[in-house]
Amino acid sequence: MLQTISPDLLPFITTVINGSLTSGHVPTVFKKARVIPILKKPALDPSDISNYRPVSLLSFLSKILERVVCNQLSDYLMQNTLHDPNQSGFKAAHSTETALLAVTEKLHAARSAKLSSVLILLDLSAAFDTVNHKTLLSTLRSPGICGTAWEWFASYLDGRSYQVTWKGSTSAPRRLSTGVPQGSVLDPLLFSLYTHSLGKVISSHGFSYHCYADDTQLIFSFPPSDTTASARISACLADISSWMTAHQLKLNPCKTELLIIPGDPSPAQNLAISLSNSMISPSATARNLGVTMDNQLSFSSHVTNVTRSCRFLLYNIRRIRPFLSTQATQVLVQSLVISRLDYCNSLLAGLPLNAIRPLQMIQNAAAPLVFNLPKFSHTTPLLRSLHWLLVAARIRFKTLMLAYKAKNGPVPSYLKALITPRTAPRSLRSTSTARLVQPSLRETGRHIPIRDEYCTLLIKVLKSWVYLGLG
């Protein structure tokens, strides 16, 4: 309805937004939220209040105002290089896949150098809900936000209220004195600015780190013979805990996970890590941004979990297949099953074919289901008819696409650093082919490195698509 009458409303909405920006004041009606608790995962106990995520429903106009401020603030931070390069949450051209690629490449590089590595996945309790407003406003001055812009953020945080809706009943309004509302447009960007100084604390101990919103990953590589690794890790976690306390954030030791990736062929190490008067024990696998990582970087557990979930989905789709058309089934399979096969599949690049064979079997089972054919039908013509690449080809295509973007398009700086254009010592016919320096196995620790011929081929394919109007 609003889109239909937008030409008549647009001048008034523009006046309201410009008035708020120029005066540094946010209307009180825009700061009222209705909170709906949503269960984090369907399998969790609904009677435990800690298993719910409070999502704030805000007015439509307030979200428009927040979007305008978010765009301007993001452009300001990007133009002045004020973003944390190791923060991938809610940033253009960044994703969970690029964040995981940055982490796994560091682990592979350390392993190829015969170094053991520790990957620590920090977990925060109700991170967005405990942000201190005074500390946040003080932090906003560091990147140069002042004057009317700072007054606008002070007005945005002050006087906020919320009501909780549960089973048809709504509570009385309560004042929101801390936190940024989950569900607003600005809260991810404000939280990343709030935690910007955490990177300096981590780097001061010689650790690498990568963040995605409130998920923080610590990477520490050391020689297998180093006997001080456990003490150094505990000291870093102690400083992180002190920083969290000073910023009214709380680490959750019970959900903090630890992976030890031994340097090949060194044996696995058993480090005793303490955090907040509790011990963190190493585990064989850990779930990281939707991907199950293991201490051998084989991703076998991830393939097993993806295969299990896809089989369950295919089973349910097969039950309702008689009531669906071919087109509807294809959309359902692609959105629920194929999307799971494609999620972060670039992490599987270089694995042997037998390691990803279970994923290919899932695709082979999905193709006959779309055409309502028996399970053991010949799948090659079906895949060709659906225009589905094989799983191995999909992994290779994703890797080449990321390499192409790293060289020519918008991509995170940490991925661009992995790509080195080949510079010929003299003028050659291959100079214009956009070749890359082929990394060695010792440098990457991968089974199969990215080849520059593949990147050249991908560039030709993309240019052909654009020429034919297909891209």
Image: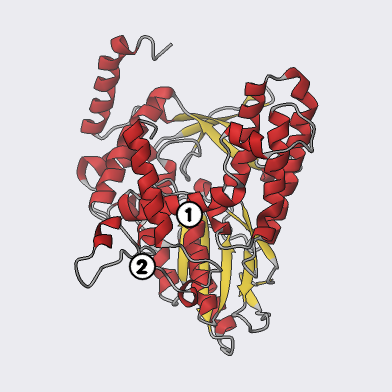
The kind of secondary structure element at disc 1 is helix
Task: Residue 88: give x, y in percent of width and height.
Answer: 43, 53
Q: Quadrant of residue 339?
A: top right
In front here: 318 or 101?
318
Quadrant location of the N terminus in the rendered image: top left
In front here: 36 or 342?
342
Number of residues whose C-alpha sits closer than 10 Å to that of mark 2, classed few (under 14), some (14–19) or many (20 or more): few
197 with respect to 357 (left or right): left
Q: Residue at position x 39%, y 14% from top? A: 3
Mark 2 highlights which residue? 437
Circle nearer the N terminus (2, 1): 1
Count of number-bearing discs: 2
Question: Residues under labels 2 and 1: Cα distance?
Answer: 15 Å
- Coloring scheme of the render? secondary structure
443 with respect to 392 (left or right): left
Amino acid on which the number 1 mark rests in the picture:
Thr
**Mark linked to residue 399:** 1
Q: Residue at position x 77%, y 24% from top? A: 320
Task: Residue 287: give x, y in percent of width and height.
Answer: 64, 57
In front here: 364 or 88?
364
In front here: 120 or 343?
343
Task: Residue 402: give x, y in percent of width and height.
Answer: 43, 52
Amino acid on which the number 2 mark rests in the picture:
Val
The kind of secondary structure element at disc 2 is loop
**Mark linked to residue 421:** none
Residue 287 visible to the viewer: yes
7 with respect to 4 (left or right): left
Considering only vertical position in the picture, is 154 above or below 260? above
Considering only vertical position in the picture, is 469 above or below 443? above
